Image (cartoon, helix red, strand yellow):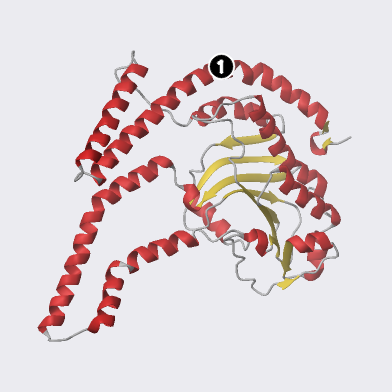
Amino acid sequence: MSGLNCLKKTKTELIQEFKQFYYQKAAPLLPDYEAKRGKEKYNLYLFNAIVLGFIILALFHFSQIMVCIGGALIFISFFALILLNPQNKAFVINSDYEMVIKEKLMPEFLSLFGNFSWSKYVVKDIRGIFKKFKTLKIFPITHLFAFDDLILGEYGGINLKLYEIRTGFRAINLPIVLMFVIILCIVAPIYFTILFSINSFIMNLVSIFNKNLGDALFLIFQALIFVFPPILAIIYAIRTAAIRCLMAEFEIPKNFSGNTCIYEKAATAKKLIFKSKNGMEPVHLEDIKFSELYNVFSTDQIEARYLLTTAFIERFLNIKTAFKADYIRAEFSNNKLILVIGVSKDLFAMGNVSKKTTGKTFVELFEELYSVLELIDTLKLNQKTGL
């Protein structure tokens, strides 16, 4: 019977336990949660409207019409906040309602699957964790990143870590963007004043020495002063791959002598670039369909073929389907199997300030975690011999 063998439970039994959890623990909390979430949602929208009004005033203070628009937006939004919160002299906006409900429900939900813990954000040694990821050959080139959910635990003797990561501009939250725009509005005049001062100083030096740059050289010089810095910023943004992905790290009792990587071919790679192969050679597998979709490189051809069995390939593709992933990558290194699952949605989500939490929310959460744990059973990662 299909199920999580290491738990010695069928999927039907797990679903029954899941239903019991939902109707006894989750469902009774949702009405009160939804009432508070709805109120906070409008508080957040109105607060953002006030911030937008101040941004308009800062950017278009020279325009009487825009000043009126910005002022009206601030006044109306502030007045609406007072009406929406009549009993509060001061209102507090809690925009992370997902955190509120997960703190109450996530520990008990995870207990259905064994010994697991959850935290919303990775705070401890965040730089060290990211540095470890960047040593992987399957991790995308990126400069901006943020961690969301972190699930740690043990299943069938396998230590498992699940990191939900946002990179590129997906790692920047709306409040940070608004702060950045405000700071940019303040700094921009100073920035251009300094540039004009530098430009004038250099041009005066040129005139003192009676030098004539010529039209072409003059244009090049102006471009270096005023155009080159924004171009650098744009290049930086382009090189920052904006993705959301799940990193699944399995510590398994197998010591790999080689380093084997699987990654999607160019058609699905987008801006993700496979890093230096460091002596790796392409592995040609008999599975034609798989070879059409994925590249395989390894420092050990024999070990790579030993690892990439029919069972692994089948489950590898099923994981992509289960998560509706844009792409999926894998790397065998030392005693670890690491998957990078590229997704466009927020995984392990229980709603947020602008999204309702329903029974479907928990069903999706169940299926996502189940599909990861099933990988351990299917590939027999907890066995010391064979895959």
Above or below: residue 29 compared with residue 228 = above
Looking at the image, which residue sits at the far front?
65
What amino acid is found at the position of numbered circle 1 in the picture?
Answer: Pro
Q: Quadrant of residue 360?
A: top right
Q: Quadrant of residue 162?
A: top right
Residue 332 seen in the current view: yes
Looking at the image, which residue sits at the far top?
87
**Location of mark 1 (residue):** 31
Q: Is residue 84 left or right of residue 164?
A: left
Q: Is residue 288 left or right of residue 168?
A: right
Q: Under tag 1, what secondary structure?
A: helix
Q: Quadrant of residue 357?
A: top right
x and y percent of residue 311 in the render? Answer: 84, 52
x and y percent of residue 100 in the render? Answer: 51, 27
x and y percent of residue 208 in the render? Answer: 10, 82
Residue at (82, 46) in percent of width and height: 378
Q: Quadrant of the N terminus?
A: top right
Residue at (16, 81) in percent of width and height: 206
Above or below: residue 312 compared with residue 2 = below
Which of the two residues, 373 or 46, is positioned nearer the viewer here? 46
Which of the two residues, 29 or 373, is positioned nearer the viewer here? 29
x and y percent of residue 138 in the render? Answer: 63, 60
